[in-house]
Image (tube, helix red, strand yellow):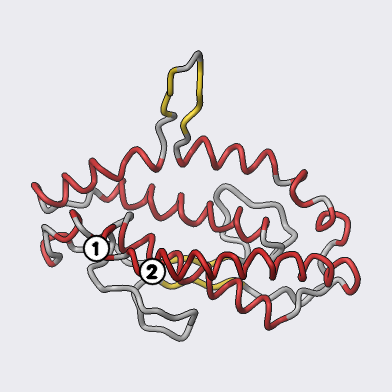
Amino acid sequence: MVSSYPVQFDVDFPTRPLGRLTTALRLVVALPIVIVLSLLSGQTFNDDNRNTLVIGGAAVFLPLVLMLVFRQKYPHWWFDWNLNLMRFSNRVVAYLALLDDRYPSTDEEQSVHLDFPYPDAHQMNRWLPLIKWLLAVPHYVVLFFLWIGVLVTIVIAWFAILLTGTYPRSLFAYVVGVLRWNNRVTAYAFTLVTDQYPPFSLR
């Protein structure tokens, strides 16, 4: 974690051999926890040609924007929800990306570390939450291509783990760097915990 950006993210490189069997069956094994995360983060399901929203993390974004704009207030429980949901989702993503072979915990930190400070809403620009998602468009474009690289990297790492039990360190650093970048953009544009524009950097 070299950067001084307020959103800090890292994943511990595994020093022990990774499990070959759970790696081979990762998509199947991860299905239950992916369903849990989907329900928590808010998904739309089609039911008799009607869309029903499952209330979760996605449902609190617009109310949070209104709270910051009109009240200049970021409720602490809201912050705790966002931080812990992001931590949990990152543990699931790290598991799917083969960065760790321990099943994602719903509350323990494990090897995935994400942190950002509680924001002082009175020190933040009250109108910026209305357009942060738009200002982050250049990041979305870059991240689109970076995530394509992540998918290729995961396939290569999958074969490497099956053959050697080890995730190549350079590939590991790349995937962690993309996750770090993604978390900074999410924290800036959607979790709204900082006004500092995210750097275009994997570090």
Q: Quarter-wise, where is residue 198 in the image?
A: bottom left
Could you tell whether 148 is left or right of 103 in the image? left
Could you tell whether 189 is left or right of 184 in the image? left
Give SS at disc 2.
helix
Type of amino acid under label 2: His
Could you tell whether 178 is left or right of 23 in the image? left
Q: Which residue lies furthest to the bottom in this view?
A: 2
Image x and y of residue 183, in percent? 44, 64
Q: Which residue is nearer to you in this view: 45 or 190?
A: 45
Q: Are marks 2 and 1 in contact (CB under 8 Å)?
A: no
Q: Quarter-wise, where is residue 173 in the image?
A: bottom right
Q: In this view, does 8 lie above or below 58?
A: below
Q: Nearer the viewer, mark 2 or mark 1?
A: 2
| Residue at 56% over, 60% down | 109
| Residue at 76% over, 74% down | 167
The dot on residue 139 is: 2
| Residue at 71% over, 66% down | 154
Q: Quarter-wise, where is residue 155 in the image?
A: bottom right
Q: Which residue is nearer to you in this view: 142 or 195?
A: 142
Image x and y of residue 156, in percent? 77, 70
Image x and y of residue 50, in percent? 43, 18
Type of amino acid under label 1: Pro
| Residue at 32% over, 66% down | 117
Give SS at disc 1.
loop
The dot on residue 135 is: none
Of pointers 2 and 1, the one earlier in the residue sequence:
1
Q: Which residue is nearer to you in this view: 136 or 26?
A: 136
Q: Distance between the residues labelled 2 and 1?
A: 22 Å
Q: Residue furthest top?
A: 48
Which class describes the residues within 10 Å of circle 2: few (<14), some (14-19), or many (20+)? some
The residue to which callout 1 is attached is 119
